Image (spheres, helix red, strand yellow):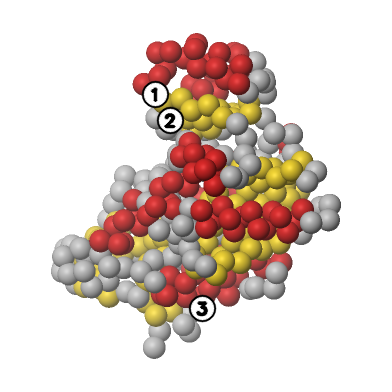
Amino acid sequence: MKKKICVLFGGNSTEYEISLKSVTSVINNLDKEKYDIIPVGITKDGKWRLYDGDIKDIITDNWYSDSLKKITVNLADGDSSLICTETGEKINIDVAFPVLHGKNGEDGTIQGLFELANIKYVGVGVLCSSVSMDKAYTKIVMKDAGINQADWVTINDFELKDLDEKIKECEEKLGYPMFVKPSNAGSSIGIGKANSKEELKSAVKNAFKFDRRIIIEEFLNGREVECAVIGNRGNVKASCVGEIKAKDGFYDFDEKYSETSTSQIIIPAKFEEGVEEKIRETAIKVFTALDGKGLSRVDFFVDGKNIYLNEINTLPGFTNISMYPKLLMEGGMTYQEILDGVIEIALEK
């Protein structure tokens, strides 16, 4: 019997467009002999709709129509189902696959909703989602876990009245150049590099457009590498390691998702003896420390034999040029097998 897979896409997030790209690849590669696919689209303003149109219209953001059925998670019965709010029609599902990036998709919000509705779902749980999404709190957990990482300063919006003092703290603790990042955003959205006080203030102002808390990190002059992890608690596997040689030394939003990206992706990357294995072991350690299950991509900076955590992405991009599937495919898995694998892990719960 086919498993019923509810695939969610879109969302009230700055990464809405990335979700449309990712979900198109996911749906096109799911085995139609194994799964009944139930697409549910979420608009930028939070409307949930049961999508029954052409998949190619999702990536161009032409999927929404007022005629689509209103749909939501059925909390009333706790029987792993969706419910059409207009007709009362119930749709039982076996697992939810939230192809949602950023706010409300990776921060534990929708994971908590699934837990309340007794719905099994692909990806990490509430705790791992929420902590991993917030870069400031990830750093706190990683520090306790003994993971090397860039030094940082956190600034909350209520501290902006003392911005000059925070700028001074950054200059004394970190030095230029620095990277400024919204604490809760992905895909390099809102990130800036500062080489002076003026640039730092400008980058801080920009980052606060995307979140109420930001972090400012010291600059690490290392190779930018990534490792995919897949598995359940106690049985996690790490992929080979890929390296990104970014245009102008900064792997920004356009470089990540443009089909004409000039960044060079090297899979597998070459390292001094023992370094790749250490990266892979550290990726699993990071994932385990955050109570991860399912999938994540763990990013590092590497300087010789020194390895520093950059960040963890609990729902990495799934586009045809995304690093997560490419890393696992280098190890022999097909795209379809990756999807089967994360679904099987969700069903184990």
Does label 1 or label 3 sit earlier along the sequence? 3
Q: Residues within 10 Å of mark 1 (few under 14, many from 20)?
A: few
In the image, what residue type sits under mark 1?
Answer: Asp
Q: Is residue 71 left or right of residue 94?
A: left
Nearer the observer: mark 2 or 3; the answer is 2
**Whether residue 48 is situated above or below residue 184 in the rendered picture:** below
Name the outermost residue toward the right: 272
Residue at 70 percent across and 69 percent down: it is 331
Q: Are marks 2 and 1 in contact (CB under 8 Å)?
A: yes
- Snapshot quadrant of residue 229: bottom right
Q: Work out which quarter of the rendered image holds the N terminus and state it.
A: bottom left
Q: Is residue 253 left or right of residue 32?
A: right
Compute the Cα span from label 2 to label 1. 6 Å
Percent x, y of residue 15: 47, 45
Left or right relative to 187: residue 88: left
Q: SS for tag 2?
A: strand
Q: Nearer the viewer, residue 145 or 263?
A: 145
Which quadrant of the figure has residue 301?
A: top right
Give, as a three-letter code, the residue at label 2.
Answer: Arg
Which type of secondary structure does the marked residue at label 1 adopt? Answer: helix
The disc placed on residue 31 is 3
Task: From the top left corner, tell me how far across and down residue 224 is, in percent.
Answer: 70, 44
Residue at mark 2: 213
Q: Is residue 46 above or below residue 268?
A: above
- Which image quadrant for residue 50? bottom left
Query: Residue at 46% of width from left, 39% of height from top?
Result: 137
